[in-house]
Amino acid sequence: MISNSATGAADGGFGVYVHWPFCAAKCPYCDFNSHVRHGGVDEPRFAAALVRELETMATMTACRPAETVFFGGGTPSLMSPGTVAAVIEAIDRLWGLPAGAEITLEANPTSVEAEKFAGYRSAGVNRLSLGVQALDDAALATLGRRHSVAEAIAAIELARSVFPRLSFDLIYARPGQTLAAWEAELRRAIGLAADHLSLYQLTIEEGTPFAARHAAGRLAIPDEDLGADLYELTQTVCEAEGLPAYEVSNHARPGAECRHNLVYWRGGAYVGAGAGAHGRLTGPDGRRATATERNPERWLALVEAQGHGLVVDEPVAPVEVADELLLMGMRLSEGVDLVRHAGIAGSPVPAERIADLAGEGLVALLPGGRLAATRRGRMVLNSLLAALAA
Ligand SMILES: C[S@@+](CC[C@H](N)C(=O)[O-])C[C@H]1O[C@@H](n2cnc3c(N)ncnc32)[C@H](O)[C@@H]1O
Ligand code: SF4
């Protein structure tokens, strides 16, 4: 189990998420809030707006040091190191950033972006998350990526020499991918990885070019059985190589888990700034859910006019907080603290419900009163959650 001291808090911890909503090109499988602006982006204006929105959000949250910061996107590695430094300085001024705080930035592995790695490190970034996606040039072309395998490997090697911590993302269950091909690619990735890998099964997201191609029969992806076999293989190889899954798609050597994502999965509090960012704040009136305007230019106009781009800011009822704790916590191998859950929900999850699911091999009770999904349970997480909540 991951120690709670990794985030320093039994309540899930506290982090700050900053969204950069721009990409150089839109990948055909991706439905993240990311936008291409061929005419360029007024970066100083967006940087000033990010700082201003963070200032406003600081007045809405209980004051406590930020244990983690995460620059996500979109493509945050399109930001200049100066913008990243200004945002980190603002977070330090507003909440305080202890010496051991984890500061992650997502980067695409092109050579242009690699040139900025040293600048990000000087700005305070101490963990890089690289979107490698595949170690196969034909697959990178199918995924519409703008980098080659050679460029990705050069970026990984450079990042390892610049940042204390590194992770990279791969997408598997890709069109035409066999078990043997994925095993070889995964083993190569583990050889290149430092201590963390995010391994996502390709999802066909509604409204994307991949969804249209798939509907037209022009994109054959592994069927459910092969998908399940690919998942099993991923777990077996990673476990044997010392990178067990600590979450459905995230693998780490013990102690190297992404502390920021643990804040989400452990039901912690987080500020979400930038276009289309979500937050969960804890204030004197309890927990609140926030979301900002998704369109970057409309978000910018809102922040410049009123100090924030919030379009959602509402209380979350305790029963919903408890549901979220289950929804997020069951993704983790450490599971959910049932006493904490019952304290928030007002009543425990019925013992017979847990016993039924345990009988089916989908959940297990862990020492310390925690409930976790088994490997099989994690493969059918949505129906498992529905059964738990029933
Ligand atoms: C915000 S995105 C990545 C950041 C960065 N722009 C990049 O592409 O490298 C986070 C990760 O989600 C994963 N991802 C995005 N869309 C996906 C999909 N449809 N199926 C599976 N994984 C996906 C990719 O591995 C990606 O690196
Ligand atoms: S995968 Fe990354 S680079 Fe591609 S569109 Fe999505 S956020 Fe942008």
Image (tube, rainbow, N blue to C red):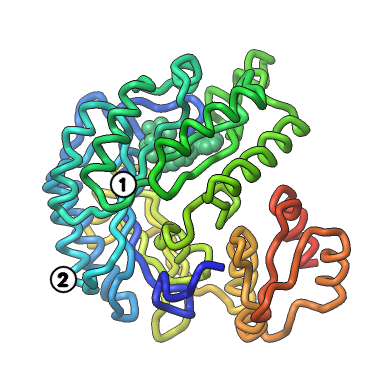
| Disc 1 residue lies near ligand 1 with CB under 8 A | no
Q: What residue appears at the point 29 percent right and 35 percent down from the top-left corner?
A: 157
Mark 2 element type = helix
Name the image quarter holding the N terminus.
bottom right
Of the two numbered discs 1 and 2 on the same chain, state the one appearing first in sequence: 2
The residue nearer to you, when weighing 139 against 218, is: 139
**Image label count:** 2
Residue 317 against residue 244 in the figure, above or below = below
Let me know if residue 226 appears in the view.
yes
Q: What residue appears at the point 13 percent right and 51 percent down from the top-left corner?
A: 122
Q: Which mark is residue 93?
A: 2
The quarter of the displayed image where residue 364 is located: bottom right
Tell me the amino acid under the disc marked 1: Leu
Name the image quarter holding the C terminus.
bottom right
The quarter of the displayed image where residue 256 is located: bottom left
Q: Is residue 386 left or right of residue 343?
A: right
Pointer 1: what residue?
A: 128
Q: CA distance from mark 1 to mark 2?
A: 23 Å
Q: Is residue 144 left or right of residue 337?
A: left
Residue 199 against residue 85 in the figure, above or below = above
Tell me the amino acid under the disc marked 2: Arg
Query: Would you call the spot at circle 1 few (<14 residues within 10 Å), some (14-19), or many (20 or more)?
Result: many
